[in-house]
Amino acid sequence: MTLIARAAAAWQRWLFAPGSLRHLALFRIGWALAMLLAARHEAGLWQLYSAEQYHAPWFGWAQPLSQAAFQRLTQIAEIGSALALIGLWPKLGCALVIATLGYLFASDALLFRNHIYLGLWMGLLLCASPCGRARSVEACWHRWRGRGPAGSAESSGVATQLIKAQVLFVYGFSALNKLRLAFLDGYTLQQELPFALRSSPLRALFCDARGAPRPVVENALHNALALSVCSCSVVLVEGFLVFGLPSRRLRHYAIPLGLSLHASIFLLMDIRVFGLLMVAAYPLFSDSDARRNSFLLSVGKGNEPLRPFV
Amino acid sequence: VISGLAAAFLLVQLAVPLAVIASRSGTDRDFAWDMFSSQLRCEKLDALVKPQGKLWGSLRWDVDFSSWAQLRRVLSPARFERYAQRLCQALRAEHGSPVELYVQSECRNDRDQAPFAILDPHRDFCSQP
């Protein structure tokens, strides 16, 4: 068999690897919760989107809205998130979130936020997946009526694989972008942390009543070596997650490390939506073993039978 | 069809960040999953306006932008040209005469870098390019 044929077969095996509907449902719930938080946060940002501010829309049709229209849009996003969260018409819920937050995203390039961008991509994948077939009102309804949900189990695999790939791309590029002196020597953290700590959930611990860092924090912020070690650790963890999450052997280390990374970012910088989106995808990685899920590893294996589903 | 769509999705996810990273833009790293890695800081960023026959004045950025993140994104040359077009139009209407607009900046991306001008300090953004 030629290398191209093997690659094509490996691609098909990887793409159509069966995925657990329960794990996909867990991801849907995490995504919906994250987007609900994001929509509620956006609702408080009317001033940023108002016509009085300067905007650079990605598309000509995405013009600034009136305050009433903006509020309606964010309310629809919240309703969509809630529908996806409980699994009542979850695809409609995902579509509502994509349409509403997508409009706001398209209306101003200056208000680009990575968590909204990531949420939109993930929502698109959820829309194309059987995300409501487990742990949902729909699934309960089908069970109550005494019949299983419609659709094939195989189709969940494609969306699951693409979501996993998306997460790995995000970690990979995030680490790649940080491979620069300004980040690795701690300068970026030194500049960012004083502002971030003021919005931290542990603000009272880090800052005094006037919002100034406490002396011990101030000393830490001036310790270039400590900041550099923290920065390098972030890069190492993100880089490790790219290989660790898909690997059955390394996943036991990768998941706690990933959780610690996002928990630290949440506690220091109050960034919750992005972390929630990423962590929500972790259960998907436990669907199958590393060999079957690694496209590159499986290229050289020809048509050997798949291992039993783990 | 599914296979093709999935391949296209992965290609976009791979190609878009790579293209942004390859462009080496100092102000615009969106779509590259660049989170907290670049730290553009401007110790000086003044927009100086001179209506014909009047004295130089300084523009207030906070009228049009609420945060540094917004302002930083408008500082890419192409975006600033579009912003300046709108700004100059408004200034001409306000003063009833031609105006000159210059941007003086001293920015840096890291601790040891020498400050640089993010926009051409000699360019009058209200004149025809």
Image (cartoon, coloured by chain):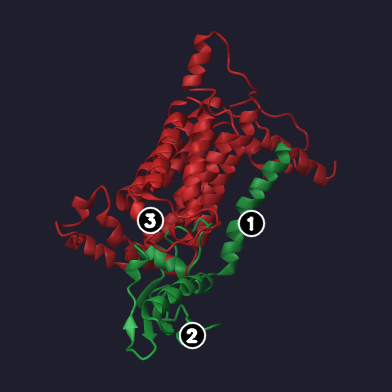
Please state the horizontal and vertical placement of residue A219, each as a whole percent of the image.
23, 65
Q: Nearer the viewer, residue B49 or A217?
A: B49
Residue at the spot x=60%, y=60% of the render?
A: B18
Same chain for labels 3 and 1? Say yes or no.
Answer: no
Chain identifier matching the green colour in the rendered picture? B
To which residue does mark 2 refer? B123
Please state the horizontal and vertical placement of residue B101, each as a whole percent of the image.
42, 82
In 3D space, how far apart are the residues under numbered discs 3 and 1 (Cα atoms)? 33 Å
Dot 1 amino acid type: Ala
Above or below residue A189? Residue A90 is: above
Quarter holding the N terminus of chain A is top right
Circle 3 chain: A
Residue sitting at the far front: B96
Q: Nearer the viewer, residue A139 or A208?
A: A139
Same chain for labels 2 and 3? Say yes or no.
Answer: no
Quarter holding the C terminus of chain A is top right
To which residue does mark 3 refer? A50
To which residue does mark 1 refer? B15
Residue sitting at the far right: A1
Kindly tell me whether residue A244 is visible in this rendering.
Answer: no
Residue sitting at the far top: A146
Is the residue marked by circle 3 packed among few (<14), some (14-19), or many (20+) residues within 10 Å? Answer: some
Dot 3 amino acid type: Ser
Chain identifier matching the red colour in the rendered picture? A
Above or below residue A220? Residue A21 is: above
Disc 2 on helix, strand or loop?
A: loop
